[in-house]
Amino acid sequence: MNPHSVVEQVLAEIRRSIVFGALKPGQEFSLRETAAQLGVSTAPVREALRVLQGEGLIVARRARSAVVAPMDLSDLGSIYGLRRLIEPSIAGRSCELVTDEGLDALERMVDVMSDEKSSIDDIYETHREFHLALLRPAATIWDLRVLETLWHAAERYVRVGFGRLDPLPSEHKRRREAHQSVLDAFRHRDGDGARQAVLRHLDENERIARESLAT
């Protein structure tokens, strides 16, 4: 297998463990043990950890180990502060470029996110795909590189913040309304409306995550 592909697979597995909570904030883990669990050498694990450290998800240790980065309210504010600087502006341009077929695909993603039969993992994966598809028509490669880092950093905060809401029947309706309002602005090709809708969405997600972490 291509060495780059191995690193990408290891990176995805460790990131998933952190984001989904299998590796807890502050938990230390061994490079050697992780490599053994994934059936690879320590080299791709080390490369993956360099990327994860750059994303703020882990803190590397010299003694062949790493620690999952703690979850901090100031970090949460920084992540969402940067997202507010980038995403609304791109959304304002993207709503004029996205195709009707693209809007229909976004509508189907909203259906998945609000469907009571969807698994939690499917909902969060679709949520990430929704925001990517929303901005992709106007985003540059560098926009996407930065946004991918911010989305990965934000996801574990969002999962914790919404963890208490996910089991509630009312959450399906709230999730649909929150994303439908963004999509409606896009369907109207309303640049200012799209910017404001994305900004409100980011504000609400941060508020929920912040309230959960503070309790």
Image (spheres, helix red, strand yellow):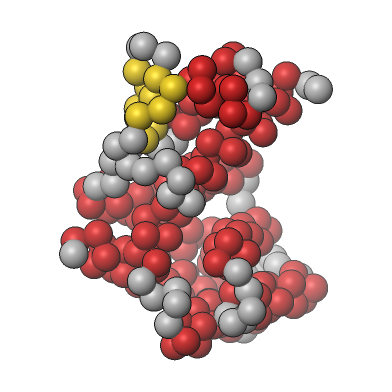
Q: Is residue 37 visible?
A: yes
Q: How many callouts does the rendering have?
A: 0
Q: Is residue 83 left or right of residue 78?
A: right
Picture coordinates of residue 193, whole percent (x, y): 49, 78
Residue 130 picture quarter: bottom right
Residue drawn at point x = 36 percent, y = 11 percent: 63
Is residue 50 positioned above or below 109 on the image?
above
Q: Is residue 196 visible?
A: no
97 or 64, which lies in front? Answer: 64
Residue 116 picture quarter: bottom right
Picture coordinates of residue 151, whole percent (x, y): 48, 51
Q: Is residue 136 left or right of residue 176?
A: right
Picture coordinates of residue 150, whole percent (x, y): 45, 47
Residue drawn at point x = 47 percent, y = 87 percent: 169
Residue drawn at point x = 66 percent, y = 21 percent: 40
79 or 171, which lies in front? Answer: 171
Quadrant of image for the C terminus? bottom left
Picture coordinates of residue 30, whole percent (x, y): 44, 22
Residue drawn at point x = 46 percent, y = 69 percent: 198
40 or 84, which lies in front? Answer: 40
> Can you name the residue that lies furthest to the left here?
215
Q: Is residue 60 left or right of residue 20?
A: left
Residue 55 picture quarter: top left
Quadrant of image for the N terminus? top right
